[in-house]
């Protein structure tokens, strides 16, 4: 089946540093990747939509300069949290449309900023 | 715009009892409907999905859901709950075409008691 590989699974970083999260579609081409954020005991909220070869579209309230999204190829999209702060600590998860299953999710990245 | 309502924030059932988790959606056309389960600290696991055809959908772990267009509902059911079913359950709606993201409900937390 369609697989999206997300790395790292978890990361701890110091406040003020940047963290990159990668999502790769392993057996299909993902022209579009969706990035979600989930705070503890809450649902998944869409942060942005990335399209291969073009600028990402951010949801209202999401700082595009803080959450840099790059979708340079049909199989790789990255989310970089720049100058991370403790309030950015969250569970980040990517998702892509695939031809057979509709939507495929990565396994998620738990970010802790200390 | 699409939206999903899960009216029950928290449900507690006894092990062996039946379960029904409610989900109502708002979408103008025929929706893609999904149920996911999430254990603490984990990613999403797809339980079942509805695209078209038979409105009663069978999923993994003994779960099923019924699409009722007249009620805009997609309730999840299980005839006999096991202690391992305790988790967070999310209903989500998507479109059957185009590169649009899934929209999630706020989730229902299921507790199972002996």
Image: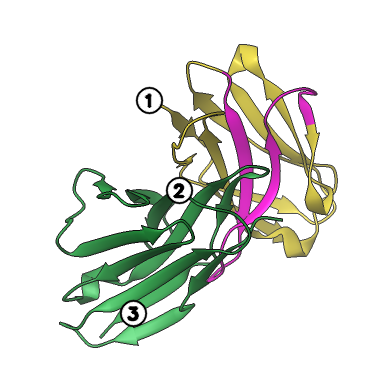
Chain colours: A green, B yellow
Residue B114 showing in the rendered view: no
Circle nearer the N terminus (3, 2)? 2
Q: Quadrant of residue B61?
A: bottom right
Residue at image coords 25%, 47%: A58
Query: Above or below — where is B32 with respect to A34?
Result: above
Please state the extent of the stretch shown in magenta in the rendering.
B30-56
Q: Residue at x 56, y 69 (%)?
A: B42
Residue at the spot of label 3: A112
Q: Chain of mark 3?
A: A
The mark tally for this picture is 3
Tell me if residue B53 is in the magenta stretch. yes
- SS class, disc 1: loop
Mark 2–mark 1 distance (CA, rounded to whole Å): 22 Å
* Quadrant holding the N terminus of chain B: top left
The percent coordinates of residue B41 (x first, y second) are 53, 71
Instruction: Give the number of the disc on residue B1.
Output: 1
**Of residues B29 and B35, which is closer to you in this image?**
B29
Q: Is residue A66 above or below residue B63?
A: below
Give the CA distance from mark 3 to mark 2: 29 Å
Specify the quadrant of the image occupied by residue B49.
top right
Q: Position of residue B4 (x, y in %)?
A: 48, 33
Residue at disc 3, secondary structure = strand
- Which chain's residue wears label 1? B
Secondary element at image label 2: loop
């Amino acid at each position: 089946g369609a697989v999206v590989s997300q790395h790292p699974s978890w990361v701890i970083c110091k406040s003020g540093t940047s963290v990159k999260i990668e999502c790769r579609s392993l057996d299909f081409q993902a022209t579009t990747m969706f990035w979600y954020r989930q705070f503890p005991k809450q649902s998944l909220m869409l942060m942005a939509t990335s399209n291969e070869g073009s600028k990402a579209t951010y949801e209202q309230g999401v700082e595009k300069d803080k959450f840099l999204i790059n979708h340079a190829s049909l199989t790789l999209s990255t989310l970089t949290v720049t100058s991370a702060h403790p309030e950015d600590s969250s569970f980040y998860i990517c998702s892509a449309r695939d031809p057979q299953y509709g939507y495929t999710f990565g396994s998620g990245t738990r970010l802790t900023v200390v | 715009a699409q939206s999903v309502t899960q009216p029950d924030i928290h449900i507690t059932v006894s092990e062996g009892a039946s379960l029904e988790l409610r989900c109502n959606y708002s979408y103008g056309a025929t929706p893609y409907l999904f149920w996911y389960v999430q254990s603490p600290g984990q990613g999403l696991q797809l339980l079942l999905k509805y695209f078209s055809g038979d409105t009663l959908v069978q999923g993994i772990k003994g779960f099923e859901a019924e699409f009722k267009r007249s009620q805009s509902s997609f309730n999840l059911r299980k005839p006999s709950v096991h202690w391992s079913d305790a988790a967070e359950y999310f209903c989500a709606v998507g479109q059957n075409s185009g590169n649009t993201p899934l929209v999630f409900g706020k989730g229902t937390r299921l507790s199972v008691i002996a």
